Amino acid sequence: MKVAPNFVVSLLTSVFLCPDVRVAAELDEGRDAGGPGIPLRKWRNEAKKLRQRHRRDWQMSNFHDDGDLMMLAEFYANRTLFEERRAEQSVSTGAVPSPYVYDVIIVGAGWSGISAAMTLSSQGITNYIILEAKDHIGGRSYTTQETFEGATIPVDHGSGWLHGGSANPLNDIALQTGNPTSTSTYNQKVYKSNGGGALPDKDLNKIYRRNFENGFMDYQEGRQDSTNADEGLDISANEYLGTISSNLKKEVLKHLYTSLIELDYSARMSQLSLWWWDNDLWLDGPNQDDYLMIDGYGPLIESYAAPVLDKVVLEKAVTVINYKKGPRVKVRCGNELYK
């Protein structure tokens, strides 16, 4: 499996620079001639669902890595044994357990790590620690405040959409914590470089339909069926680009690769599996809109994590996890040992 690294995504706009076109994606309204922009991402999502229905008979489990590694060390299934170990430790030292000795160690303060911590707390297990390598919680759900044309706006450096609308469990968390959302209109505009203006919507629509949805997507699907070994999705992308003679169409297609694939999956196409990249599942529910977090994803994870923030230690990069020696798992962060 090829794992996606962090990938910077802007909550409000994504800008792609190339020799022939300049792209501004996810605008709620167009400001140039040629139309108000078109919902390419919405069309892409609808086409994706249709393709998946046709492939459902051989579809296998989705591979996904949300950036969090959770390790439950010495988790005592037997509550009596848990209490006995705690009592023995207190008697032998004459004090409470060392701050570096825990019943559970969680590596990573992203959504999985924070959720694991909250589950432990709900079960009455409090002698645990969360080790986070970065200087903030949330993993890819990280928001900074940036200045643009005199206004301060939140910019997400990872998580962008809240997919699936009301069917997404994170929507419930947003409602509970008072973090506002907005329904994405998906509209995109493509701008030519050197003041060439916006590409008319009808032209963008034509390139999308002919060269992306009915061009590249069909091409890579054919390679999925014909290859004997998995490979990066970029190989099919570059091969298909080689069949197009128009420079404008090539550059617009590169933008569509970025906007509709790389930004959605938070990885370069070279890091996505040809066989499995489009094999993720959709949330079922009455509302299938995609939301944007108005204040960014950072405030959402911070609100959610508030009950366990005191358990998080930032800038603690785990370098070694040793399962082999002794009854306890040992976790090392530089010169510090946790067990």
Image (cartoon, rainbow, N blue to C red):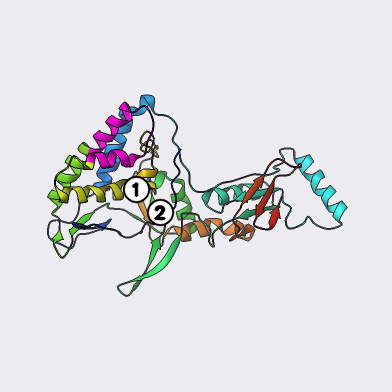
Seen from the viewer's position, the closer of residues 234 and 29 is 234
> Looking at the picture, which amino acid does disc 2 mark?
Phe
Count neighbours of disc 2 (C-alpha within 10 A) and say few if under 14, some if 14 to 19, many if 20 or more: some
Image position of 97 (left or right of 291) = right
Mark 1 secondary-structure assignment: helix
Majority secondary structure of magenta residues: helix
Which residue shows up at 43% across the image and 65% down it?
Answer: 144
Q: Position of residue 215 (x, y in %)?
A: 21, 38
Q: Amino acid at mark 1?
A: Glu
Q: Is residue 57 left or right of residue 200?
A: right
Say which label, 1 or 2, has the lower sequence index: 2
Magenta region, residue range: 216-240
Name the image quarter holding residue 79: top right
Which image quarter: residue 217?
top left
Circles 1, 2 touching at the beta carbon (< 8 Å): yes
Residue 220 among magenta residues: yes
Q: Residue 60's quadrant in the figure? A: top left
Mark 2 secondary-structure assignment: loop
Residue 329, position as x, y percentages in the image: 70, 45
Please identify the residue farthest to the bottom as the structure is shown. Answer: 150
Q: Is residue 290 visible?
A: no
Q: Position of residue 251 (x, y in %)?
A: 21, 51
Tag 2 residue: 7
Q: Which residue is more in the foreground, 236 or 281?
A: 236
Image x and y of residue 291, in percent: 36, 52
**Which of these two is toward me, 242 or 78?**
242
Q: Which residue is mark 1?
A: 262
